[in-house]
């Protein structure tokens, strides 16, 4: 049933694009403000406990409501799963956002293109058009994990509670840091995020390789790991960018909107590959 819930949520995500604003982080900001004292501890272990409390409260609440609805009527639990998955995707649709950026770049609207690039990057974009598009391409290959693949993986593993867990951690790490938040809290949060993102990021990298140039993607990843000295949970984005660019090499696109379009197509093909594998796994579990 989780595969069907995922499929329906993806279809609804395309049909209900006008309701995208409902899955923004406003609710999480209001919730976090009531518990922001947990982010002030200078002790790493207390700060780590604070991170877990903040992200586990909505996760456990989701788990409880889901089990309660399943107990009342399985159809209610199923609808709850679809709704929670739909709310945790994104929150912005990556293809629409990047499509708008490409249109603005090609029409010469540098102000709009710069604004959209800033939203995608979460930072100030390069002023040069080609460099800006290349930076957006890198961001898109990495951002797909937080907007899609991470949610898919944890939903498949833990149901709607897993999707809420991943989105809560992602929302929390994206919140602007203030003077009250301790460095220990930030370090514990980044470590938790890195651990949760590690498996889906590497599965997405494998998907990129299968959906594009397998040989180039594998070759680039071997070189990356041969020269990598960072801890395993710190390199998720780099792995995604490395595998994605390697997978795109066969397209021979120059840096710019052409390669960016190819990156979007690569992500779309990877989603299809994931869905096919998930469907086959679901069939095997039903048959077993």
Image (tube, grey):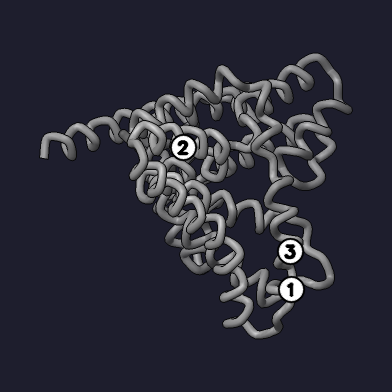
Give the secondary structure at mark 2. Answer: helix
Q: Earlier in the sequence, mark 2 or mark 3?
A: 3
Q: Is residue 128 visible?
A: yes
Which quadrant of the view contains residue 95? top right
Q: Which mark is residue 37?
A: 1
Q: Residue furthest left?
A: 288
Residue at image point 47% right, 28% down: 9
- Direction bottom: furthest residue: 43
Q: Residues within 10 Å of mark 2 (few under 14, many from 20)?
A: some
Give the x, y percent position of residue 81. 44, 38
Q: Where residue 35 appears, x then y in whole percent?
A: 70, 67
The image position of residue 249, as x and y in percent, is: 49, 32
Q: Which residue is mark 3?
A: 34
Q: Which residue is mark 2?
A: 80
In the image: residue 57, left or right of residue 110 = left
Residue nearest the observer in this picture, 48 or 123: 48
The correct choice, above or below, for 287 with respect to 221 in the image is above
Residue 219 visible at all? no
The secondary structure type at the circle numbered 3 is loop
**Location of residue 277 with respect to 46 vertically, above or below:** above
Q: Residue at x 57, y 49 (%)?
A: 167
On-image quarter of the C terminus: top left
């Amino acid at each position: 049933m989780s595969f069907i819930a995922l499929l329906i949520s993806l279809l609804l995500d395309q049909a209900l694009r006008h309701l995208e604003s409902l899955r923004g982080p406003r609710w999480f900001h209001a919730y976090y403000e009531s518990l922001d004292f947990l982010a002030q501890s200078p002790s790493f272990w207390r700060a780590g406990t604070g991170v877990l409390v903040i992200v586990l409260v909505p996760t456990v609440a989701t788990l409880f409501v889901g089990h309660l609805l399943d107990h009342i009527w399985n159809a209610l639990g199923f609808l709850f799963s679809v709704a929670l998955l739909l709310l945790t995707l994104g929150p912005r649709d990556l293809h629409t956002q990047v499509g708008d950026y490409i249109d603005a770049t090609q029409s010469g609207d540098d102000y709009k293109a710069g604004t959209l690039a800033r939203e995608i990057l979460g930072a100030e974009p390069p002023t040069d058009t080609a460099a800006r598009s290349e930076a957006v391409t890198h961001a898109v290959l990495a951002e797909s994990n937080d907007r899609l693949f991470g949610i898919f993986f944890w939903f498949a593993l833990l149901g709607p509670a897993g999707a809420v867990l991943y989105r809560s951690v992602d929302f929390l790490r994206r919140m602007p840091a203030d003077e009250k938040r301790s460095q220990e809290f930030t370090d514990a949060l980044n470590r938790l995020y890195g651990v949760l993102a590690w498996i889906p990021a590497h599965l997405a990298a494998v998907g990129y390789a299968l959906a594009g140039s397998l040989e180039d993607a594998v070759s680039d990843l071997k070189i990356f790991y041969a020269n990598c000295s960072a801890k395993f949970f710190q390199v998720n984005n780099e792995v995604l960018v490395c595998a994605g660019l390697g997978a795109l090499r066969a397209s021979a696109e120059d840096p710019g909107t052409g390669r960016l379009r190819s990156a979007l197509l690569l992500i779309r093909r990877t989603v299809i590959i994931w869905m096919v594998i998930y469907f086959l796994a679901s069939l095997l579990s039903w048959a077993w």
